[in-house]
Each structure stands twice: as structure tokens, then as C-alpha cells.
Amino acid sequence: MNALVQTPTIERPTVELRKGETMRLQPVRAFRAISRLMKDKENTAAVFDLMRALSGNAVSRGYARLIKSPQGGRIAYYRDELAERLMDRAWLESFAPGTVGAAYLAHMDERGFTADGLTEISKATPDAQVEAAHPVVWYARRMRDVHDIWHVLSGYRTDALGEACLVAFSYEQTRSLGFGVIAVAAGAKLGRVKNGQPYRAAIRQAFRNGKAAAWLPEVDYPALFAEDLEAARARLKIKPPTIYQSIPPELRDGAFEAA
């Protein structure tokens, strides 16, 4: 069955983006955003603010790469809106135990997350234009919506260390400077915890795992959801996060616990 089908979309505003356009880097805005995030790891609005401040040409380069391959070009042609699918509870519940889809639903339910949560926060980011009707902006939405899917695929949970590892993993996949800054800043903060745990080593491994994996932005996610999770990880060359897993769950929030 063809998993890529065009789904109904909301009415979207227009935006003017020129080919190869680079968003201006905003270091002051980035510094303020990372300061807020280091004080409160749950401040998702600060993450989006930071990513907007440091997006540069990462999104346009990612879209250009996507349309160069047959699979990516097909995905871009249909412009499937992942958020709309991920908000379809009946669709998510249709996947068999052990599949990526079942693991994703369990991940979201365990944490009380919903796909529209990230959508609403991203909409509130000043000058983000994330809901605009443009293929490059559609790609930006796609990168927003795969975040929790990548949590499931990579094996990193949503504690402070897991988030730091996932953004390190994501940096190698997207080359978005914001991801790299968050990973380095979180590693520095966690590294100050003197409890003998290899926080920084876990983050370094996450960078390596992201680099070694297949390029995940061009994955057909609706089709992937029907695959066995472990088989999907093997096919996509996603290595197990062994250092992260060696750290007791109760210690993975480290220096962020007080916040």
C-alpha cells in the first residue's frame, strides 16, 4: 500500500522566500534563548526561538538535498503534513505491537505529549513563518514534527541528557547550528555534575550516531510506522545509545534537576 498520500491541509498564508535564501543569524537572540533553556529544560519556546535565531541556510539546504533523491523528491511532491497524521489517534492505534508506530504512540502517551503541542509553540515563535505555504517552510515543519519520532528511533528519552543527546544526533542529520549549540551548552552544564557519570561521552556518542545513521529527513514516515522498530533501526543504521543507557535514569537530569 502506498503510504504517501496527499492529506487535507489547513489554509496557509503566503511567504516570499527566494531560492537559496539564508536567514540572518541573530547571536543576541540566540544567547538569550539558550540562557532561558539552561535555566529550564522544559522551555520549549526557548528552543524554537534559538532555532530561529541560528537557522541560517540549514532549512533551505535540507530541502535542496531532499529533492535530489527519488524518494525525497516523491515525499516533497506529496508534501505530506506529518503533524496532521500524528494527531490522528485512530491511525496511530492501528499499528501492531513492536512497530515504530506503536512505540511512538507509547512514547507520546507516557509523557502526555501530543503532536499539536509542538505545533502551537512553534506558531508563537516571532517571525518564524512556520505555517506558510511554501515548500521550504513545509520542510521546516517536517523537521519540527519528526522530533519525537527521532526520540523513538534513536533510543534517547526526554530527560535532560536524552534531549541533549537527541539534539546532538539531530545536528549531524540537519547541520542546523541551533542543535549544535544546545548540545554543547547542555554538555557543559551536565559536565559540571561530579557524580562519575559519562554525560559528555554520551553526547559525543550521540553526535557519532547521528552522523553514522542514514539521512532521516527523506524517510517515508507513514510507511516506517508499520515496520518493526528494531528492524527499522538496523535498516536506517541507527546505533544503540550504549553510553546514555549506562547512566541510571534517575541521574540523567543531572544539573537540570534544580530547575
Image (spheres, rainbow, N blue to C red):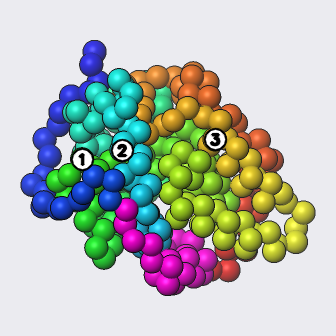
The magenta span reads 22-46
Q: Does the magenta stretch include residue 37?
A: yes
Q: Nearer the viewer, residue 143 or 257?
A: 143
Side of 181 relative to 244 (left or right): left
Q: Name the residue under label 3.
A: 211
Above or below, 40 relative to 202: below
Q: How far apart are marks 3 and 2 (CA)?
A: 18 Å
- The amino acid type found where label 3 is placed reads Lys
Task: Identify the residue at horizontal 90%, vertical 63% (top origin).
Answer: 196
Where residue 43 sits: x, y (%)? 49, 74
Q: Which residue has dot 1 on it?
A: 135
* Amino acid beneath label 1: Pro
Residues 150 and 62: in front is: 62
Depth order, front residue of 105/42: 42
Residue 230 in sight in this render: no
Q: Mark 2 points at which residue?
A: 63
Q: In this view, does 20 lie above or below 96?
A: below
Foreground: 211 or 233? 211
Badge 1 local density, few (<14 within 10 Å), some, or many (20+)? some
N-terminal of the pair, mark 1 or mark 3, is 1
> Could you tell me how far apart the alpha carbons at marks 1 and 2 are, in whole angstroms?
8 Å
Vertical placement of residue 183 versus 71, above or below: below
